[in-house]
């Protein structure tokens, strides 16, 4: 049984370094053999007995290869503003397990293209992962969810669709009647401030 954690990694970002160390320490505490690979070549050289493989800064071609052989993508960020990773997985036909908050609630349809779970309920996440690994969820169900995910990305989140939605939002905003940015009260306040400033300058020049 192998798991992989893939994504962009920058040695200069302290959060990246600390998070990697925490994950390695967690694997050690669970007595899981782990290894870290920084390139595709070094990743291919990892022994098969490794339980957890951490991949740093995965190239797109290798990412596509990983997704093509995955049964489930686990997306853990909290309060993500949108998140492109679930869309990449869904476009590859892979169901997504993600937090029921933030961006995934817009991209992932619970029970249709994946699952949304409370981040505070770890047991719910592990049960979902276990069900996929041991085959408790039939492969045809996973395949069907993958196809639903592909369709959803193409129909809702393609460049053309998102550009069209953005244009509609802009047009709707332009139709709304809005009060002038500078109201009469602000004009009066501005005149008072300018008058006071002029008085101060005059006093300074006279003295």
Image (cartoon, rainbow, N blue to C red):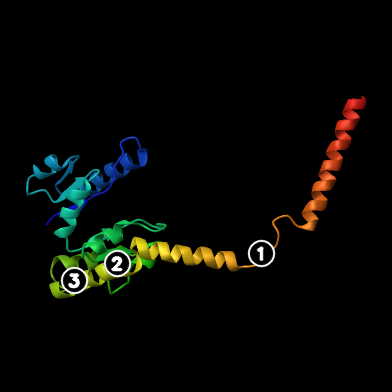
Q: CA distance from mark 2 to mark 3?
A: 19 Å
Quarter holding residue 200 = top right
Instruction: Report whether 158 appears left or right of 205.
Output: left
Give the residue pinned by disc 3.
142
Badge 3: residue crowd in 10 Å (few <14, some 14–19, many ≥20): many
Quadrant in the picture for the N terminus: bottom left
**Dot 3 lies on which element?**
helix
Residue drawn 53% across the image and 66% down it:
171
For residue 178, the mark is: 1
Looking at the rendered structure, the number of numbered marks drawn on it comes to 3
Instruction: Report whether 204 appears left or right of 64.
Output: right
Give the residue pinned by disc 2.
154
Q: CA distance from mark 1 to mark 3?
A: 49 Å
Badge 1: residue crowd in 10 Å (few <14, some 14–19, many ≥20): few
Residue drawn 28% across the image and 74% down it:
111
Mark 2 or 3, closer to the camera: 2
**Dot 2 lies on which element?**
helix
């Amino acid at each position: 049984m192998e798991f992989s954690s893939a994504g962009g990694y920058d040695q200069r970002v302290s959060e990246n370094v600390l998070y990697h160390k925490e994950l390695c320490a967690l694997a050690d505490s669970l007595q899981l053999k782990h290894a870290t690979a920084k390139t595709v070549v070094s990743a291919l050289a990892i022994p098969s007995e490794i339980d957890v493989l951490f991949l740093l800064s995965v190239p797109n071609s290798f990412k596509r290869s990983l997704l093509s052989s995955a049964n489930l993508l686990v997306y853990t960020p909290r309060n993500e503003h949108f998140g492109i990773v679930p869309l990449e997985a869904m476009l590859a036909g892979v169901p997504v397990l993600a937090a029921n908050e933030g961006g995934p609630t817009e991209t992932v349809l619970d029970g249709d293209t994946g699952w949304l779970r409370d981040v505070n309920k770890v047991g719910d996440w592990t049960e979902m992962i276990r069900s996929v690994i041991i085959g408790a969820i039939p492969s045809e169900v996973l395949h069907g969810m993958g196809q639903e995910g592909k369709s959803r990305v193409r129909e809702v989140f393609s460049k053309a669709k998102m550009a069209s939605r953005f244009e509609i939002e802009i047009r709707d905003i332009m139709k709304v009647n809005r009060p002038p940015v500078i109201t009469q009260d602000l004009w009066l306040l501005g005149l008072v401030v300018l008058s006071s400033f002029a008085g101060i300058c005059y006093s300074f020049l006279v003295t």
